[in-house]
Image: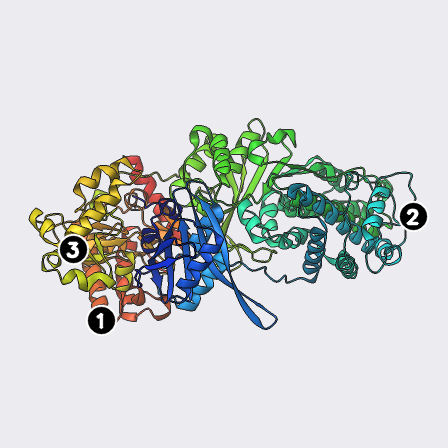
Amino acid sequence: MSTAAPISLADENRYQDLFLHELNWNAPDHPPVSVTTEAGETHTITNVASYRGIRVWSCDGIPGSRTEADIDRVIGKTTTDRLVVFHNDAEQVWRWPARRSTNNTTATRLTRHRHRNGQPDPPFEARLNAIRLPIDHEVDANTLLSRVRDAFDVETRNESRRASKLMARMYTALERAYPQSADRAARDHEISVTMARILFLMFGDDTDMWEPDGKPDAFRDFIHLETTTDAANLAEQLNGLFADLNSSTASRTVPYINGGLFDEPVTIPPVDKEFRDAILDACAVDWSTISPAIFGSMFQSVRDAQTRRELGEHYTSEENILKTLNPLFLDELRTEFDNARTHPDAAKQLNKLWKKLGDIRYMDPACGCGNFIIVAYRELRDLELQIMEQLQELGGDNQLSFDPTLSLKVTLDHFHGIEVDEWPARIAETAMFLTNRQCDLKLKQRFGEAPRRLPIQTQTRIVVQSALTLDWNTVMSAGTASIIAGNPPFLGISQRTAQQTSELQVVWGTGYHGTLDYVTGWYAKAVDYFSTHDGLWAFVSTNSVLQGEAVAPLFRRITEHKWRIKFAHRTFPWTSEAAGRAAVHCIIIGFAKKVTQPRLFDYPRLGAAPVERAGVTNITPYLTDGPPVLVEPATNPLNPQIGAVAYGNKPTDGGNLIVEADAYQAVMADPIAAKYVRRYVGARELLHDTMRHCLWLRDADPEDLERSPVLKERVAAARQFRSASRAESTRDAASTAHEFRQVSQPDTAYLCIPRHISENYPYFLSQRYEADVICSDANFLSPDPDGFIFAAISSTMFMTWQRTIGGRIKSDLRFNKLLAWNTFPLPTIGDDRRAQIIAAGKEILSARAQLTTLALAEMYNLATFPEGLRQAHRQLDYIVDDIFGIQDSNIPELDRQDVLFSHYRRLTKRK
């Protein structure tokens, strides 16, 4: 069972449920506030949640900016830090008082974030997730304030590189030159073209590109000498220069360029002195030393973070690019080179390899600013140069058998890209020109000359379109020498737009599964692209593609088409050259149909260097070493001995059956209602031993429901809430509004298992409660009469299985009874072993009982993990590990996964 997504609760105006049950805030602590406007309208604003002085308010209606500001000012007298949500049936406006300091004074203005109900809204979803509080520990007020500000008051981030700052200055000054009435799409297009051209010219200044017809620093001198210091004629001069560079007959400052870079007529509007100063400052940078591979992140830093999030863009470091390209094909080519140069017929083998390089066709179908294409091209050009050098060193007939300026086989037109956004596509095309020039300079340094590239004849083609709606063969025809690799966008189901979801459904067809990340669309397209050829392909992905229910539908299609994993990098933390880089964990997987030596890279700890595992024979979809395996959800445990778990009790009551702390005394003052108050345990209460209560009226006397004012009012409110629901099943439950919507509470003591826990705990936590403690639907439960389920869940082997198979919400582990618990491959055990496991579990409970001042979350804090409790878990692990055939409890997680999958395959073969 899953709860409604946060955005769905917001769409239903269920703000208290949203903040209390999904975002983990505390109950409201202030009475409603009434505000009468100058126009005589009265609005009641309700406090729906709070946390350490920060309050969330809800106002029925969207009265307009002026009235909203008046209302906010009134609320501000009671609440310094607040979110106010104005809403109606169609939309909602979230307002946060942002403070700006100027001229030694501080002004407050309301930010405004509008969301239309029922519409996909990834930025809004991201904001809600940003203010979700952790369930495993309390945060202070300043931390939450920082989160809310980051979500609702996003400031422009300072750029870390001087070049980035200068490009941002240019962009801003140029954007300011356009009138407010200018079409935004046309304006952005013209700015992207202009910025790409200026970057090209500055790079040309610093790489001797204008020789022999031009002079060094020609563009810088042009700006200095041909434009006035007040920039009055700068736009006119640049427009003329760009026209000249597209004309083969015009007299010009630098040689004729063309090649697509200057052929589009773009007229820059009049600009100011700031734009000229920014260009000259940028010209002072030595662009020859800056790798074009960082241009993408540098240029993207100019644009706002929201654009990046909407497109799912994540800019890859060279380190991570080479983690992809090296094992996919570059390492093999380098090995071939080493073998060729020591071969008895070295010249023949070197020429054969050289031709092979020329046959390669490479495409990144989510190329962004071209980082992957740039690095792939640069590395192949470097290898080609080594081949040419080796042939020269061989002497004899080989020495003068080629012209280094004419014989190059690795060329720009062998590299292709697809990019949904024009801005990065333009940068990618330009950066490839610049990379080409850097490679030519290396050639010139070795052989004394380099090819003449101007006017541009050959270039990389970047198609601006969504890769999931395009036939990739129209960009680059598939062949046996075709290579696909890149870093597609990561967008979960709650982050992507309706259009993106539609694209994903089309490419997956009947194989579509709702848990598939947007990035998996590129996997499906790659399989289709190579339907008749045996190429190579690899993608960087978020590790969510290997978690939960998404694994089976993703890899079923891949394996059905005979693809095998050629190499893989297991989970590692993301690194990017871009400011505000993505905080995600990634994996890299490369595929081929013929794999002789698969390569698996593991990370002993997050942030550590990769370690290649020796002796790998096959890589599974879970990036372990072993025969193929796919874990499917199971309705019953594979091993019936482990017992079943059930979902907790779900109220679906609008909060009316829940007794929050501020209402507890009032409810208990009603003697009839007090009889039905029970302790109510969700994941947070379980982990932190905090108190919460509910009204448990399942067997209540009907007359009590009428005699008690508290019960009568709350049940009526719950009935009204259910009756207004969009879900038919919830409306049907209005007739039994005194009961929880779904009930699973046992009549005996039971084990309570949180649905989510932090990934930082060493074990999956659970706790036993008596029958009169009500388990919420934030948990699972099991009667577990002898404690065996508690012990099994508390073992390292289950925690390893949960991390490997179970889903996640953000980084938190998500318990799933069908996928993670029912499939847990515990071998069949005898009575003696079962008794040993139960006894070891009791020792853990005994060790916990000694820690009377600590909540469960505090007990399992790794920094202060009590030794007695640690030893009790070790004893349990010794027994459980032995059942699985593990003798060394210190083995790496990857080895434990191998053992678990081996037992899973055995158990599923019996079914």
Q: Position of residue 682 (x, y in %)?
A: 26, 56
Q: Which mark is residue 852?
A: 1
Q: Nearer the viewer, residue 24 or 269?
A: 269
Residue 645, can we see it?
Answer: no
Q: CA separation, marks 1 and 3?
A: 35 Å
Q: Nearer the viewer, residue 610 or 458?
A: 458
Q: Secondary structure at mark 1?
A: loop
Q: Earlier in the sequence, mark 1 or mark 2?
A: 2
Residue carrying label 2: 213
Q: Is the residue 387 above or below the residue 471 in the image?
A: below
Tell whether 429 sits left or right of 451.
left
Q: Earlier in the sequence, mark 1 or mark 3?
A: 3
Q: Quadrant of the C terminus?
A: top left
Q: Nearer the viewer, residue 407 or 129?
A: 129
Q: Name the residue located 65 percent from the left edge and 50 percent from the top edge.
A: 296
Q: Secondary structure at mark 2?
A: loop
Mark 2, Cα crowd under 10 Å, few <14 / some 14-19 / many 20+, is: few
* Labelled pair 1, 2 in contact (Cβ < 8 Å): no
Amino acid type, label 1: Thr
Q: Nearer the viewer, residue 638 or 613?
A: 638
Quadrant in the rendering for residue 818: top left
Residue carrying label 3: 710
Tell whether 664 sits left or right of 91.
left
Q: CA separation, marks 2 and 3?
A: 91 Å
* Labelled pair 1, 3 in contact (Cβ < 8 Å): no
Instruction: Count the numbered circles shown.
Output: 3
Amino acid type, label 3: Val
